[in-house]
Image: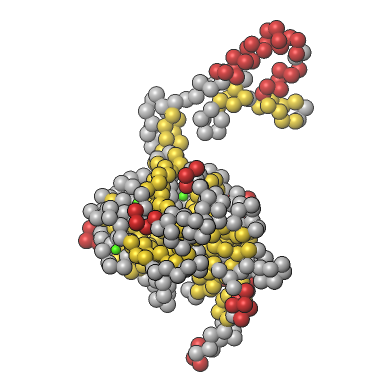
């Protein structure tokens, strides 16, 4: 512990169960700010062999080297949860003067940095607050973070390509600022998530900002800036912030702390909107009864599909979020809740109408509880129970081959729904691409080497092309997309 304190790491996050993905005991991930070859990232775990619980002795050890996370960097933000893994705890670090890390949990106590393959390295920027959420409700975890006076990022995890992300931040969202904490929460309980950027006024005013990121069917989420009201604090020296329901009315309050460059009092804000919206708060527990950091909570609704929250210990930056999955529901009705622990165990149970607008505690399953529940579980539109008693996407195209109308007969399955489109006909020399959204040049082969369809014409002399074939070719190029 001495080593850690002396390095002054700023982003801290608790992680449960490194070995085999979940022992029910917390570990602590520490992002250090390294100086040269001094101060690698640390991973502190309970050393069970050296501990004697009957005597009250709990020994800790730094296992970062064995785990493969002992990297040297300017560590800033850290967030832990199932990011590219289904339930195991992965680690994302946004760093300063160096590439970000995305440590995929290998399930054997080791991690592999997949940031480069995933497209989240962002090597030229200096990360600060970070949070995990599933903005488009496709079951894949997305990452949002702020860069210090650099473009802020909204990385959506792609559904079609494995463990890859793309930045969909709009120009306004990305606008550089001296950012500290970043919070994702549904502040007005309308069932769409907001992103709050806490900025520090350090060379002139810098207002805090709030964006709503709304899911769209078959498209990237829509991003709109909201009026953050008095929480804009243009002169605020904001350093940290948290969202929690202080007064128990089911709506989140926002607490902003200030300091570092000037002493200012804490501020606590209430949200004016959304008083008539429904909500649900879920608190999963470990087998020891502690808050289950690293757990994933999914609430299925009648109309708006599944909403996912990850209980993480240290997102934000210089602060720690509450270990509660807070769901705004708007006018929708929750029908089923599933909780996944880092070791892969899970429970599912239906939600009663009387449980809307309440706080639920969900305990780690006893052995007999994990089996398929005997009670009837509904999953809502587009989802159905699988053989394990968990809700999963319905593949409408396979289950109902004639689900699409005759004028748009080509069916593509999507998460929570499906798409129908017309058969695409392409001109000679072109063929539909994999998802049928465009015509692409047919692929031709010359002596075993692959080349594009246009190369077929290259065997002809250019002179000939210019006389008769070139007009034909250009017609194809213009009308290739029908
Ligand atoms: Ca997602
Ligand atoms: Ca909202
Ligand atoms: Ca409240
Ligand atoms: Ca589907």
Which of the 4 quarters of the picture holds residue 275?
bottom left
Residue 84 vs residue 272: left or right? Answer: right
**The one of 322 and 112 positioned closer to us in this rendering:** 322
Q: Residue at x 41, y 27 (%)?
A: 408
Which of the 4 quarters of the picture holds residue 451?
top right
**The one of 337 and 56 positioned closer to us in this rendering:** 56
* Position of 434 relative to 478 (above/below): below
Q: Residue at x 59, y 77 (%)?
A: 5
Image coordinates of residue 69 in percent, x first then y, are 63, 66
Image coordinates of residue 390 in percent, x first then y, are 39, 56
The residue furthest bottom is 55
Residue 145 in sight from this viewpoint:
no
The residue furthest top is 467
Residue 419 in sight from this viewpoint:
yes
Residue 269 vs residue 420: left or right? Answer: left
Image coordinates of residue 105 in percent, x first then y, are 58, 62
Image coordinates of residue 8 in percent, x first then y, are 59, 73
Q: Give the total number of marks visible in the rendering.
A: 0
- The quadrant of the picture occupied by the N terminus is bottom right
**The one of 284 and 180 positioned closer to us in this rendering:** 180
Indicate the colouring scheme. Answer: secondary structure
Which of the 4 quarters of the picture holds residue 452?
top right
**The one of 400 and 433 positioned closer to us in this rendering:** 433
Q: Residue at x 52, y 33 (%)?
A: 435
Residue 289 vs residue 148: left or right? Answer: left
Q: Residue at x 31, y 68 (%)?
A: 246
């Amino acid at each position: 512990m001495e080593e850690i304190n002396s390095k002054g790491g700023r982003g801290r996050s608790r992680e449960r169960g490194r070995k085999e993905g979940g022992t029910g005991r917390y570990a602590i991930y520490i992002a250090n700010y390294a100086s040269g070859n001094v101060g690698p990232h640390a991973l502190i775990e309970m050393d069970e062999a050296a501990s004697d619980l009957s005597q009250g002795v709990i020994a800790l050890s730094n296992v970062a080297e064995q785990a493969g996370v002992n990297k040297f960097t300017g560590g800033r933000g850290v967030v832990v949860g199932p990011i590219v893994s289904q339930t195991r705890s992965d680690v994302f670090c946004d760093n300063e003067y160096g590439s970000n890390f995305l440590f995929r949990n290998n399930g054997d106590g080791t991690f592999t940095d997949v940031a480069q393959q995933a497209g989240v390295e962002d090597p030229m920027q200096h990360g600060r607050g970070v949070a995990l959420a599933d903005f488009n409700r496709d079951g894949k975890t997305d990452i949002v973070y702020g860069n210090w006076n650099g473009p802020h990022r909204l990385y959506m995890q792609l559904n079609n390509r494995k463990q890859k992300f793309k930045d969909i931040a709009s120009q306004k969202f990305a606008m550089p600022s001296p950012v500290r904490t970043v919070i994702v929460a549904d502040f007005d309980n309308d069932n769409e998530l907001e992103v709050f950027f806490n900025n520090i006024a350090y060379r002139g005013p810098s207002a805090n900002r709030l964006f709503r990121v709304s899911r769209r069917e078959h498209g990237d989420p829509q991003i709109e800036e909201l009026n953050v009201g008095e929480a804009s604090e243009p002169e605020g020296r904001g350093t940290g912030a948290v969202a929690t329901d202080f007064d128990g009315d089911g709506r989140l309050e926002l607490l902003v702390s200030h300091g570092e460059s000037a002493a200012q009092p804490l501020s606590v804000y209430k949200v004016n909107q959304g008083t008539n919206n429904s909500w649900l708060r879920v608190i999963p527990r470990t087998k020891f009864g502690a808050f289950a950091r690293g757990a994933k909570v999914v609430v299925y609704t009648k109309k708006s599909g599944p909403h996912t929250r990850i209980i993480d210990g240290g997102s934000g930056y210089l602060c720690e979020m509450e270990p509660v999955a807070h769901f705004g529901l708007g006018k929708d009705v929750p029908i089923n809740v599933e909780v996944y622990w880092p070791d892969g165990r899970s429970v599912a149970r239906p939600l009663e109408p009387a449980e809307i607008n309440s706080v639920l505690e969900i305990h780690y399953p006893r052995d007999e509880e994990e089996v398929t529940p005997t009670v009837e579980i509904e999953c809502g539109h587009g989802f159905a129970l699988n053989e394990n008693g968990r809700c999963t996407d319905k593949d409408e195209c396979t289950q109902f081959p004639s689900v699409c109308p005759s004028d748009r007969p080509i069916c593509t399955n999507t998460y929570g729904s499906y798409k129908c489109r017309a058969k695409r006909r392409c001109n000679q020399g072109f063929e539909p691409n994999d998802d049928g959204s465009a015509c692409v040049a047919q692929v031709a082969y010359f002596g075993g080497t692959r080349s594009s369809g246009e190369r077929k014409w290259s065997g002809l002399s250019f002179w000939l092309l210019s006389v008769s074939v070139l007009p034909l070719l250009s017609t194809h190029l213009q009308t290739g997309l029908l």
